[in-house]
Image: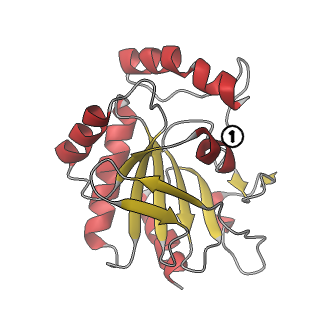
Amino acid sequence: MVNKLVGGLGGLLALMVGVGAVYYFGQPGLQAVHGTVRTARGASSNAAPASAGAVGSTEAQAPAFHVTALNAGSVSVPSGRPTVVYFMSAGCGSCVSGEQQLVRMAAHAPASVVWLSLDVAPGYDTANAVLSMAQEVGAHWPQAFASNAILQAYHVDQLDMVAVIRRNGTLLYDGPLPSSARLRALIQQAEA
């Protein structure tokens, strides 16, 4: 399925760039469910994102990965620090807005938070496009390309998805980019 996803991604990205809208990956007729909370093992529930990380929740260890950043060094996840991973595309209008939202959040977040943006379309976006977008919006954190394994492990089925990982390495939230207030609360939980 991941090979189908990546194979058809170029055409879908071209459509998205043309209309500037968020679209869904996957097979025709399938829709991503906004607000679905997923564990690292792929089990999903229809619980509202607000319930992610609640006491007694079934948080699982976040899938581990290592990427080489396009702009500096490398990043390992989990990192032992609260981490926000943003799944985006440099050619996506809503992703630019999402990256801007994260820039505003990062300005007021604790310095211990690791921010990482992963472009989901390495066959479509260039390294220069990703870095230009980051520079344009002021995202001064690592930018990298997501591998098929990362996309599959984090169940990325649409653009503008976020994973928030606690400092202990458990996956607190995995879903659509939440509101700034909700993301602020998730970051506070990830710090604990």
Residue 88 in the image: state x and y as whole percent: 44, 40
* Quarter of the N terminus within the rendering: top right
Residue 167 in the image: state x and y as whole percent: 54, 79
Residue 58 in the image: state x and y as whole percent: 78, 70
Instruction: Give the residue drawn at x 24%, y 58%.
Output: 140
Q: Which residue is mark 1?
A: 33
Q: Residues within 10 Å of mark 1 (few under 14, many from 20)?
A: few
Instruction: Give the residue drawn at x 60%, y 43%.
Output: 151
In the rendered view, does 38 fall on the left or right side of 16? Answer: right
* SS for dot 1: loop
In the rendered view, does 121 fall on the left or right side of 7? Answer: left
- The picture quadrant where one finds residue 89 is top left
Of residue 97 and residue 136, the one placed in the foreground of this image is 136
Residue 96 in the image: state x and y as whole percent: 32, 39
Instruction: Give the residue drawn at x 38%, y 39%.
Output: 95
Of residue 48 and residue 57, the one placed in the foreground of this image is 57
Q: Is residue 1 above or below residue 176?
A: above
The type of residue carrying mark 1 is Val
Of residue 150 and residue 15, the one placed in the foreground of this image is 150
* Quarter of the C terminus within the rendering: bottom right
Instruction: Name the residue at the bottom extreme.
Output: 192
